[in-house]
Image (cartoon, rainbow, N blue to C red):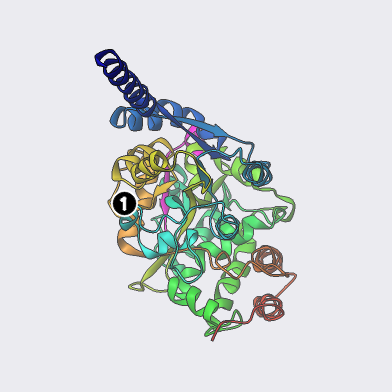
């Protein structure tokens, strides 16, 4: 009897011991991403910082090629072989994954309160009731300029349209530099760094963007035509042959010191820092007149969600709560200057150009690109059509009014705003 009892006790202890050991074993989380360029940052900075505070959870960053990511993710999710954590593109691609049940609802995840409604909108259902990715970073639009060129020509940084065109005229008259480096061959450059860059000052950022979605404003309204009218004025300042100039051509013209101003996205900062041999500065889109409220395109770009089929959901949620923290925001934003934290807690930026871009959040109102939420779902696709018409207006092959009418007619053909 005693022997049997002892055996039973020993067996029970053995079972408990092995169960305890199994529970204490390290959990490994795999992150899916399209940003292979960030591999060293995750491996050397982000993952060690998390693992130091969370013993027992190991993290592996496993990126795919950017052009293959969407298809690869779809195949992996269907096969049940996708990682625990999914890096999210903004709006419809991630929304589609959520609707298919591939991404978990993380609306109540601790840390989500650290983000504004605008920041979360890129990874929410249309009604805003479900969130499926933690916002990680945005990119900001404005203009990067050659400080040496400005100093040489005695040009002050422009804040109004009048000052902006005066600066362009002065650069053009001098002849040393092309006033502005932008081409129209690749189409998207004209829209993203042109129309979506300066447009928010005219349609008043979120006010106009949300009114367009609700059907309360149209692209043929004056505040939506006005940015096209401004783009039409850019033509004389873009240099010879800009119609055949690609996006890499524009980058090279600026970093080689041949152009004085570059209509920019903040993602250029890292590359420009390594290539430009001159001092650089940046300014936000000039306002129509002194004293006007300024608006910036502070576009939600990248987030991270939980694979709904993950077998390590608790550990993955722990990781996502850390991604939602100011600690993560500080490391990430400084490791990738030009990709700005969406966390409400301000991040101290070390890069001077990044500091300049992010400082505009304090004085201007932030919005996102007008074509990304809901309005880019149909055919003709408003985002792609805006590329075409922005280039046409700059080239002089369409008037601002004609361009706006084409866009609105295309939108009307498939989009019926919910009343």
Q: Is residue 116 above or below residue 331?
A: below
Neighbourhood count class around disc 1 (C-alpha, 10 Å): few under 14, some 14–19, many 20 upward = some
- Looking at this view, name the residue that lies furthest to the top: 3
Q: Position of residue 32 (x, y in %)?
A: 55, 39
Residue at 46% across, 53% down: 133
| Residue toward you, 373 or 81 | 81
- Find out whether residue 284 is within the magenta segment: yes
Q: Position of residue 87 (x, y in %)?
A: 52, 45
Q: In this figure, which residue is indicated by the disc labeled 1?
A: 110
Q: Position of residue 340 (x, y in %)?
A: 40, 48
- Find out whether residue 264 is within the magenta segment: no
Q: Can residue 142 be seen from the camera position used here?
A: no
| Residue toward you, 96 or 154 | 96
Q: Is residue 374 above or below residue 361?
A: below
Q: Is 18 on the left-hand or right-hand side of 260?
A: left
| Residue toward you, 13 or 301 | 13
Q: Quadrant of residue 407?
A: bottom right
Q: Which residues are magenta?
A: 272-285
Name the quarter where the N terminus is drawn. Answer: top left
Q: Is residue 195 above or below residue 97?
A: below
| Residue toward you, 107 or 250 | 107
- Looking at this view, name the residue that lies furthest to the left: 2
């Amino acid at each position: 009897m005693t022997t049997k009892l002892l055996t039973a006790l020993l067996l029970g202890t053995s079972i408990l011991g092995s169960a305890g050991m199994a529970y204490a074993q390290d959990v490994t989380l795999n992150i899916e991403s399209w940003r292979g360029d960030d591999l060293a940052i995750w491996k050397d900075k982000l993952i060690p910082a998390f693992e130091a505070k969370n013993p027992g959870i190991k993290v592996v960053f496993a990126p795919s090629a950017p052009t293959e990511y969407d298809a690869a993710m779809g195949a992996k999710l269907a096969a049940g072989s996708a990682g625990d954590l999914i890096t999210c593109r903004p709006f419809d691609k991630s929304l589609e994954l959520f609707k298919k049940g591939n991404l978990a609802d993380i609306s109540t995840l601790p840390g989500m309160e650290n983000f504004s409604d605008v920041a979360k909108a890129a990874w929410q259902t249309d009604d805003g009731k479900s969130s499926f990715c933690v916002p990680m970073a945005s990119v900001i639009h404005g203009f990067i300029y050659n400080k040496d060129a400005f100093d040489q020509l005695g040009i002050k940084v422009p804040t109004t349209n009048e000052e902006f065109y005066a600066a362009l005229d002065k650069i053009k008259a001098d002849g040393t530099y092309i006033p502005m480096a932008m081409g129209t061959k690749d189409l998207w450059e004209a829209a993203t760094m042109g129309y979506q860059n300066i447009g928010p000052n005219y349609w008043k950022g979120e006010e106009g963007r949300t009114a367009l979605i609700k059907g309360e404003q149209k692209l043929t309204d004056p505040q939506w035509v006005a940015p096209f009218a401004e783009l039409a004025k850019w033509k004389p300042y873009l240099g010879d042959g800009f119609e055949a100039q690609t996006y890499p051509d524009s980058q090279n013209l600026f970093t080689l010191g041949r152009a004085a101003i570059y209509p920019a996205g903040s993602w250029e900062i890292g590359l420009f820092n390594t290539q430009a041999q001159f001092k650089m500065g940046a300014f936000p889109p000039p306002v129509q007149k002194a004293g006007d409220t300024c608006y910036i395109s502070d576009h939600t770009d990248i987030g991270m969600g939980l694979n709904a089929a993950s077998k390590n959901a608790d550990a993955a949620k722990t990781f996502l709560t850390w991604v939602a923290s100011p600690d993560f925001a500080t490391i990430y934003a400084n490791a990738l200057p030009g990709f700005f934290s969406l966390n409400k807690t301000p991040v101290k930026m070390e890069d001077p150009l990044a500091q300049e871009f992010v400082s505009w959040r304090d004085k201007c109102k932030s919005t996102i690109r007008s074509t990304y939420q809901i309005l880019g779902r149909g055919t003709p696709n408003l985002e792609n059509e805006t590329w075409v018409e922005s280039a046409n207006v700059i080239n002089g092959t369409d008037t601002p009014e004609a361009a706006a009418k084409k866009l609105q007619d295309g939108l009307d053909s498939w989009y019926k705003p919910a009343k």
